[in-house]
Amino acid sequence: MPDADATTRLGETLAPQLGPGDVLLLEGPIGAGKTHFARALITARLAARGEVEDIPSPTFTLVQVYGAEPEIWHADLYRLSHPDEAIELGLEDAFDEAICLIEWPERLGDLTPAKALTLRFEATPGGETRRVALSGPPAWAARLSALKGTQDG
């Protein structure tokens, strides 16, 4: 993703391909584009239903839930100190029923769903551009083929 616009396009392109039980693990340092991507994806899902909503960062609330069909859970686990705290947030049930966007997924420990798609965000030196590497189980391969040509770098 060479810039914020490309990160937005990735979120918009991936949004209609997601369904109940899809978990996206958003990895990377602060400022790499995780929240920007999540906002773009959520905005696109809501817009497809004719809805507009403010998409705040869940840094302090830990989880924001959006009433799209299915629900979208956007979680920022940065402040968690133990994976058990993720259980208290209700994430285990959401992993089965909702679309989940998880920032700082390493805080999940053993609760990390094996079926999840990982998006590793990083800023290039100087911070003007970004890279996103996608990885996941083989079932994601065909679904991600639609993204070819939308990534600019």
Image (tube, rainbow, N blue to C red):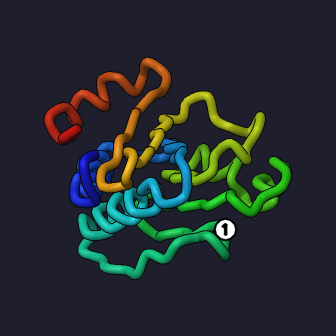
| Number of numbered discs overlaid on the protein picture | 1
The spot of residue 9 in percent (x, y) is 22, 53
- Amino acid type of the residue tagged 1 in the rendering: Leu
Q: Is 146 placed above or below 4 here? A: above
**Label 1: few (<14), some or many (≥20) within 10 Å?**
some
- Which residue does the numbered mark 1 point to in the structure image? 62
Helix, strand or loop at disc 1?
loop
Rendered residue at 28%/63% (across/down) = 44
Query: As drawn, which residue projects farthest toward the top?
Result: 138
Front-most of 53 and 130?
130
Rendered residue at 31%/79% (across/down) = 52
Query: As drawn, which residue projects farthest toward the front?
Result: 126
Left or right side of 131 for 94: right
Rendered residue at 51%/53% (across/down) = 101
Q: Quadrant of the C terminus?
A: top left
The spot of residue 12 in percent (x, y) is 26, 55
Query: As drawn, which residue projects farthest toward the left?
Result: 149
The spot of residue 77 in percent (x, y) is 68, 57
Rendered residue at 31%/43% (across/down) = 17
The spot of residue 69 in percent (x, y) is 41, 60
Front-most of 86 and 81?
81
The quadrant holding residue 146 is top left
Front-most of 122 and 110?
122
